[in-house]
Image (tube, rainbow, N blue to C red):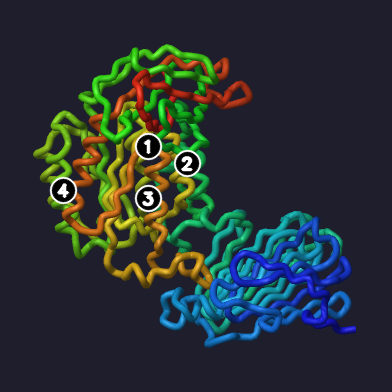
Amino acid sequence: MVLLLAALCGSARAVPAQGFERELATPEKVEVTIRNTNGRVAVTASDEQRKNVSLRAESPGAPIGERDVTAVVDGAWVNIDVPPRGPRIDNGRGRNGNGGGDTLDRDRIDLVVRVPPRARVKIVTDGGAVDIVGNVESAEVTTDTGTIRADVPLEALKYNFRWTASRPRFFSEVELPPVKEKRGNAYEISGRFGDKKAKSEALIRLDLTTERGVMLFGVSDPEMVPSDLRERPLTEGARAIIRSGDEDLIEAIRRAAPRLVGDYTRTLPPSKSGGPAFATRNQNQSAQPQSSTLAASPEQQGFARFNASVTDRNGRAISGLKEKDFVVFENGEPRAVTSVAPASAPFNLVLLLDVSGSVGERLDVIRKAALAFLNTVSSEDRIAIISFRDDVQLVSEFTTDRALLNERIKKIDAGGGTALYDALAYVLVNTLKPLRGERAAVVILSDGDDNKSFIPFPEVLEAAVESGALFYPLYIPSGLIPADSVAAPTKTLDPVRTRFLTLTSRAEEEGRKLAQVSGGAYYPITRLEQLQRAYDDVVAQLRTAYTITYASNAAGHGGGGGGDDTREARVRVRVERDGAFVRLSPTVTITP
């Protein structure tokens, strides 16, 4: 017997956004076919969904009803179809190619479908993204340009990935065999994982086909995917990160280029242990009255250090504080404050300059801005300058020689892609790490849009937290794409593809996050005259910050292994002044 969705029990529940939910009565063994030309499709095989198929339909635009989504149930077979409500949206970019606008919002319908384990699934979209998650029996997916993400068990898996009209763009958490070129400009990756003798009832089959889309395999968080999925040589910045021995950042590069990382690693001598032990922290940094709380994981007994900015109720900096004015608690116990570096103490400042093609036409402005920064900071501050495009260039190591820095800045050239995340990682492991917890800050002059890095932003953010340095992103729009034409992820048919095709609007969000977790500040620059005011503000913040060192007793006995004896510490600071507000950077353990 065939049942239409409109004939099922009328228990549609309203959901946030424009849409509805349905429970479709089916047996445990089910085959689901879905076609959605103007929207996304997400299918999850869940143990909690042993019987029935759960359907949620949503639209960011006009209200949708049951007539907009047809669901036909015939025993163990379910067919879900979304007829087009308007013009076809090509490539997930809308009628005008910008991925947003009224057409996309009005016409798009997104489907979220939960199916029983071992369901067979077939999905067809045009430009919409497709997610397949969980223990399905088989998944057959076809798109024109939509990103396909498959995150399924690997114990017994047979897979076939095809690109029928372009060279492959893909990212996998596990190593895949080489791409095979087929006739007619088609490409294929196929193989098996796990038990090759597994019975058919335990085997998962993935058959994914796209014309020009991106494929993500085994990826739980698309934000962890690097900006450039094309195979390319390791940059000097990437090689320096690998040489640093930072396991998390190396693993991020390995996921993007496993063969290249393996080849380069084999050329290196055995790694040497040593270097500072960075802390970790889970709480966002924000101004708190009287005190602030953060988490630290010192790796051996000794001393810990952090930066603190202290202001009054009106936001004015409080200067002249001494050791006696700060009380530090570690896991609720008071700890001895051994030193408070006054605001007059010199800082280590890194000036990170974006000289990629997106700002190339304003290279003169970048040079003048860099020179203006040199004239703003104290002559005693040590400054290092690093420029980046698709690779990093060390313009100058730390120095107080302003004449040398002036000459080096004048010789900077521009051009190429923007590997911002790789440049930040390079600064963390190559420039800041040897400082061993000294007072340090990074000023970033960029448009904030990354399109060339091996390392994804979340990995850089975690490393920045652990470094204890203050970050001050000064982001200048490139001007190449007007702000109103940049697609926001929620308004894009396929946010992953949009991310790889064009500059995105994520720069501001990432700049704010980087500043927040480090204790710095974010400056969106919309007019060039704002740069000098931002420089003055950065220097004022640095000059009113205190570097506090205290005796830490939270480390695991035996030191440095980061094993079972290492305990997370909760560090709290109180300032003995009425109405004082304190903002902290992450705590860094100072090793002997």
N-terminal of the pair, mark 2 or mark 1, is 2
Q: Residues within 10 Å of mark 2 (few under 14, many from 20)?
A: some
Q: Nearer the viewer, residue 363 or 116?
A: 116
Label 2 – label 1 distance at C-alpha: 14 Å
Q: Which residue is mark 1?
A: 519
Q: Position of residue 159 (x, y in %)?
A: 69, 66
Dot placed on the residue nearer the N-terminal end, 4 or 2? 4
Residue at label 2?
462
The image quarter in which residue 354 lies: bottom left
C-alpha span from label 1 to label 3? 12 Å
For the residue carrying disc 4, how many other residues have a C-alpha within 10 Å: few (<14), some (14-19), or many (20+)?
many
Secondary structure under tag 4 reads: helix
User: Which residue is disc 3 drawn over?
Assistant: 511
Q: Secondary structure at mark 3?
A: helix
Amino acid under label 1?
Gly
Query: Which of the two labelled residues, at mark 1 and mark 3, occupies the earlier sequence position?
Result: 3
Q: Position of residue 168 (x, y in %)?
A: 53, 70
Residue type indicated by callout 4: Ile
Residue pictured at 49% horizontal, 65% vertical: 489
